[in-house]
């Protein structure tokens, strides 16, 4: 055995004095990862909260205008919209809300994720024949909503 300690051959992080630009790049990348993780946590909190609350279209518009949602990725914004349009009380205002809150690409993604028949049903056009996949949680919620409206 030589006189070196275990771990002497492992790479060490660059120090401020010896790392130069490389060290600063590592710091910047690390800061970006932390910021992205914080934003992901905020979006996750919004997603969880949407499972338990009903809201008006005005409240949904205010949610979409928050800094968290404005800074979110398109995919996160679409996911949140898919969740909250099922929880809006005044459904007749949903088309205007989506137009105000989302870009055309995002609106098309919401419609694709929800599906045109389900979108029509969510907006109150409940006539016609419907085929729902009850293994899909979103479509199961639609069926529950239809049943609730049928009782009213």
Image: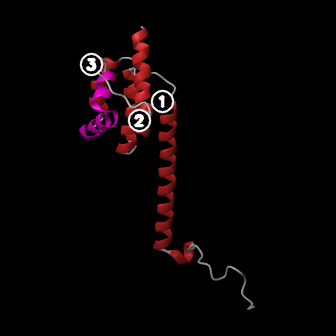
Residue 68 circle label: none
Q: Secondary structure at mark 2?
A: helix
Residue to which mark 1 is pinned: 50
Mark 2: few/some/many CA within 10 Å (<14, 14-19, 20+): many
- Residue located at (34% from left, 23% from top): 122
Towards the viewer: 87 or 142: 142
SS of the residue at dot 1?
Answer: helix
- CB-based contact (under 8 Å), mark 3 and mark 1: no
Within 10 Å of the Cα at label 1, are there few (<14), some (14-19), or many (20+) other Cα atoms? some
Which of label 3 and label 1 is nearer to you?
Answer: 3
Instruction: Identify the image quadrant of residue 93.
Output: top left
Q: Is residue 39 above or below residue 84?
A: below
The image shows residue 131 at horizontal and vertical percentages of 33, 27
* Residue drawn at 66 percent across, 82 percent down: 8
* Pointer 2 residue: 80
Foreground mark, 3 or 2? 3
**Residue displayed at 45% across by 32% down:** 137
- Return the disc, 3 or 1, that comes first in the chain's sequence: 1
Specify the quadrant that holds the C terminus. Answer: top left
Q: Quadrant of residue 57?
A: top left
Point out the tag, 1 or 2, that comes first from the N-terminus.
1
Would you say the magenta stretch is mainly helix, strand or loop? helix
- Residue located beneath label 3 in the image: 128
Which residue lies at the image location 49% right of the left edge and 67% below the top edge? Answer: 26
* Residue 4 at x, y percent in the picture: 72, 87
Residue 81, by quadrant, is top left
Q: What stretch of residues is rendered in magenta? A: 104-121
Q: Give whichever of 110, 16 is nearer the camera.
A: 110
Foreground residue, 93 or 134?
Answer: 134
Q: CA distance from mark 3 to mark 2?
A: 28 Å
Q: Is residue 59 above or below residue 72?
A: above
């Amino acid at each position: 055995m030589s006189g070196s300690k275990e771990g002497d051959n492992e790479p060490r992080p660059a120090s401020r004095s010896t790392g130069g630009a490389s060290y600063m790049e590592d710091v910047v990348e690390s800061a970006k990862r932390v910021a992205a993780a914080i934003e992901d946590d905020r979006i996750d909190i919004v997603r969880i909260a949407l499972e338990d609350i009903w809201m008006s279209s005005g409240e949904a518009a205010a949610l979409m205008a928050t800094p968290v949602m404005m800074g979110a990725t398109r995919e996160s914004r679409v996911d949140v919209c898919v969740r909250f349009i099922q929880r809006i009380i005044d459904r007749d205002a949903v088309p205007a809300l989506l137009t105000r809150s989302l870009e055309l690409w995002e609106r098309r993604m919401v419609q694709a994720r929800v599906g045109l028949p389900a979108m029509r049903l969510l907006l109150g056009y409940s006539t016609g024949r419907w085929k729902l996949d009850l293994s899909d949680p979103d479509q199961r919620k639609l069926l529950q909503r239809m049943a609730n409206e049928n009782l009213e």
